Image (spheres, coloured by chain):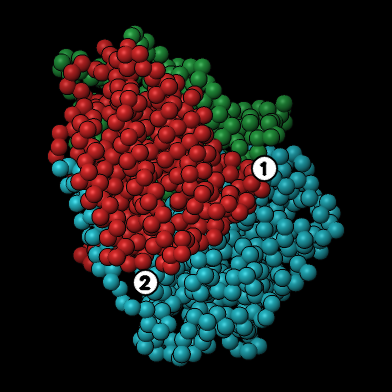
Amino acid sequence: MQTFFQTLTTGLSDGAIYGSLALALVLIYKATEVINFAQGEMAMFTTYIAWALMGHGSTFEWWAFFATLGIAFLGGAALQQTVIRPLERASVLTAVMATIALLVILNGLAAWIWSPQLQFFPSPFPTSSWVIGGVHISKQDVGTFGVVMACVLVLWLFFRFTKLGLAMRAGALNPNAARLMGVRTSLLLALGWGFAAALGAVSGMMVAPTVFLTPNMMQAVLIYAFAAAILGGLESPVGAIAGGLALGVLLNMLGQYVHPVTSELQLPVALGILLAVLLIKPAGLFGRVVVRRV
Amino acid sequence: MTRRLRNPVAFGVLIVAVVVAPFVFSNYRTYQLAFVGLYLVALLGLDILTGFTGQISLGHGAFMGIGAYTTTILVVDHGVRDLWTIPLGGLVAGVIGLAFGIPATRFAGPYLALATFAIPLAFIGLLKRFPHFTGGNVGKNLPQLHAEFGWHTSPSIWFYVVCWVVALVMLPLAFFIVRGRFGRAMRSVRDSEIAATANGISTAGVKTLAFGISAFYCGVAGALYGIGITYVNPDTFPIDLSILLLVGIVLGGAGSLYGMVFGALFVEFIRISWGPSLLDLFSKVHHIDTHAPGSGLVVYGVVLLVVLYAAPSGAAGLAHFSFGSRTRIIRSRHPPGPPAKGENA
Amino acid sequence: MRKTFLLVVAALAVAAAVGATAGARPAATPGVTAKSILLEGTYPLSGPASGYAPIPVGMGAYFSYINNKGGVNGRKINWKYEDDGYNPANTVQITHKFVEQDHAFALVGGLGTEPQLAVRQYLNDNKVPQLFVATGATTFDRDYAQYPWTIGWQPDYEAEGAIYGKYIVANMPGAKIGVLYQNDDYGHDYLRGFKAGLRSHQSQIVTAQAYDLSATTPPAVQMAKIKASGADTLVLFAPPTPTIQAYVIGTKLGYKPANVITNSVSATDPFLTIAEKSGSNIVEGTISVNYLLDPSNPIYNKQPGMKTYRAIMAKYAPKANANDPLNLYGVAKAWNVVQLLKAAGKNLTRAGLMAQARKMNYSTGKKNANPFALPGVVTFTHNNFQYPISQVTVVKYVNHVFQPQGKLLAGRGALR
């Protein structure tokens, strides 16, 4: 039972990180139908900025955390305006290629500016654990989970209760209609990218203390975020978070309890389960099934 | 439009270029151009799936891997003659692709793209799980290919000949596939699944078959790839390879078969030749360290972006012939008319 | 016609790409002129393994230093290296370019077990030296008879593993051992050597947990299993990132083994400092081995080799971080390359170079030891013994630096 709860908390904490990046993917996908491959590298790059703001030091600074969110927001919006917008009229595949180019550039740039060497990134939470009934609950895991969920909540409140949020939802739902209603969709898309980038920055800063800061630190997380996003349904923000949490727990439980699942097969087995889910629910657990009449 | 594709002049030009190249270029460049030939085969396959059937795959590097491993295991462990393993590599990859295509084609658009992302990941995992069969992480070395039929030439030139003979067989075959009845079915699935179904086309069947054909092409290319680098291990078939193939068809112009020649040139030369040369050039203007970690990636990414802006429909689109509905393979996000599928209405 | 146009464009592109390929004809010995020697190598300058990028920088700094002093036998060393991203397919193509287009005299210090395995047969077929590969995989030293043009340099992983085994038998009797190892050739070499070193004490291994390099999550599950096994001695055979992660995860799980052993690739002061900063309380007392001077450790600052090293780096690679042990690794290897080139004489040939590599004897006794290695380390190859550096010293991490413990040990002796 001890191991079970330990595995569960680690799984939830991992899952929160996958979920937040998945949510960032969903935000952009809903607005532009583009799967943003650069999402992970954007998160990595902003985490390096946070590290620079903290003076490459060993203590976590909350002001730097929030400053990074702001920089990420502006950076994301700027990328949308400069890199993605000129390709608005091109095919989706071309736009996806542009995000892949962005992935490559950001990865190279980070190595170029900050060197590819492994760096320490401080956590706002202590490494110690609470021991409850023999179960070690890591404070870092709980803190990570809390921060990610808080950010998601803030984002939800924004979309649910502000006028801008409403406009953005309208723009995502039907760009043409929204444009006709006088909504400046191009600006909204930039905002969407901004929010996604900020959310990615959260996942980057939360995962860096465990995987350490390197230009490649987000590539694995991005793969899990993809999986989480399709598991939950690419159209569904709630699904992204739920998918992330489910995947985090699933991966940890597989590794802990299923003996034939050696470490090489952990990923394939998890992906196999994912595909099985998709076969039953082709639009993900929370996705709307598009009804097609012939 | 497709009738125009069967342009004997273009095919003639290609053959002449292929025949002349080894006499003009050095041994090493010929070796690189051989890779262009095998990438052409892989891109043709992916283009049949993505460009002509409208299904995006992020996993076809794995089918190249399956082809390469089939060749390697047959040659090294079973003593099969290397040339014979090339079609076998294609067949094994094709069958696996077909099997994967059956469930995969139930997924729509981005779900398929992300589901195919799982193929290389699973492939790498399986390679490591069964090291007795695959050689695990250490991989396997293949013997160098040597000229046959009593011909004495360097291994690089012989490899070039093999690659391009295969490519020049696979190219007309691709034309044959996309021109025929099946080709029409593929394009109608691409342009409107609803209309295709209304016309009595089994969309799932067409997509599955297209998946199998593309996997076959990539398997053949992979067999050549294994023979060319004389080594296979899991690192040789990273996810980057699958993405590079997709980059190749986009830059070549998805939906154009001849455009793939250009895509193949880009795939082969950008990282190994053009990138470093560009860096050298920059370093003469502006003092930068050409060996700075990551600098090569930055150049690669920037070149990719520039090409995308210059030619959003790829090299084929650049050749200013009207593309018609073909550009909409991967549906434009802001179509002039009402939304294509009506799901947002 | 569109297609014709496309093909013409394509043909022009090839012509442009290929451009001036009519390179110089190979001289009597490729890559050697009256004034220069061309040496080349492949390194990961991008991707997950790009942390090794300082190595060729250190080598370049040393070659510049030698060139500035007049070169070797009147020839300047021309050092070129390219990025293979740790993908063997790239390594192969770039290596073909080095050999067939650039006509390199020798390939030096190519990095990575798998990339170098991929080109070994090709280089041997073409009789091009594959000198001092940057990997400790045993095969590069052991299989010299099959691959006469290939030779390693650093202590091999198997030998290093054996030393840890022997160390436990001698100093930690009754230890219950839990091993975390990377599930590839690297990890398996270490584990095999480790078991050989333990000899009859192998049953003390209570658990050996493999994790996968591509399994991108930290090895949390494996560490939990090691903790649950009751092991009091943790042995880590992993590259830096997972090693540091293992330390931190262990601490999170409340696991406090009495002894920790970490392989030399990961056991550098900067990496362990990161583990400490991340909150691990089990770093202190970590045991490892070392064979080169460690620029991140102040206790070596008075060594003449360290002074030379710092002077070279300051002058020829001022932007590099001279405290990074990888730079010193590069300098130490370049020193050895220069010794071979000198010994191979004025009439430089590839065969002559390999002949020298097969009979190296650099030691303190002969006053020609590698100045950048730990005092007393010999570089020795002879007949059927082709493990250039095989001695190490055990080091213990105390107060943020690795302190040497006792005298040098012969790694290869430990296996017999």
Q: Which residue is mark 2?
A: C102
Cα–Cα span, label 1 and label 2: 48 Å
Query: Image check: B208 left or right of C173?
Result: left
Query: Image check: C170 left or right of B183?
Result: right
Q: Where does the N terminus of chain A fall, quadrant-wise? A: top right
Q: Which residue is mark 1?
A: C223
- Kind of residue at disc 2: Asp
Q: Nearer the viewer, residue C339 or A5?
A: C339
Residue B101, given in percent of the width and then of the height, sits at 47, 28
Chain ID of residue with mark 2? C
Chain identifier, cyan in the render:
C
Q: Which residue is at 76% across, 68% downward?
A: C414
Residue C224, given in percent of the width and then of the height, sits at 68, 39
Callout 1 touching callout 2 (CB < 8 Å): no
Q: Is residue C408 visible?
A: yes
The relative height of residue A245 versus residue C67 in the rendered view (above or below) is: above
Displayed quadrant of residue C194: bottom right
Q: Which residue is at 49% across, 90% downward?
A: C345
- Kind of residue at disc 1: Met
**Circle 1 or circle 2, nearest the eye:** 2
Mark 1 falls on what kind of element?
A: helix
Residue A208, given in percent of the width and then of the height, sits at 48, 43
Q: Is residue B35 visible?
A: no
Query: Image check: A283 left or right of A135?
Result: left
Q: Which residue is at 67% across, 54% downward?
A: C188
Q: Where does the C terminus of chain A fall, quadrant-wise? A: top left
Displayed quadrant of residue C25: bottom left
Residue B72, given in percent of the width and then of the height, sits at 55, 51
Q: Which mark is residue C387?
A: none
Chain identifier, green in the render:
A
Chain ID of residue with mark 1? C
Chain identifier, red in the render:
B
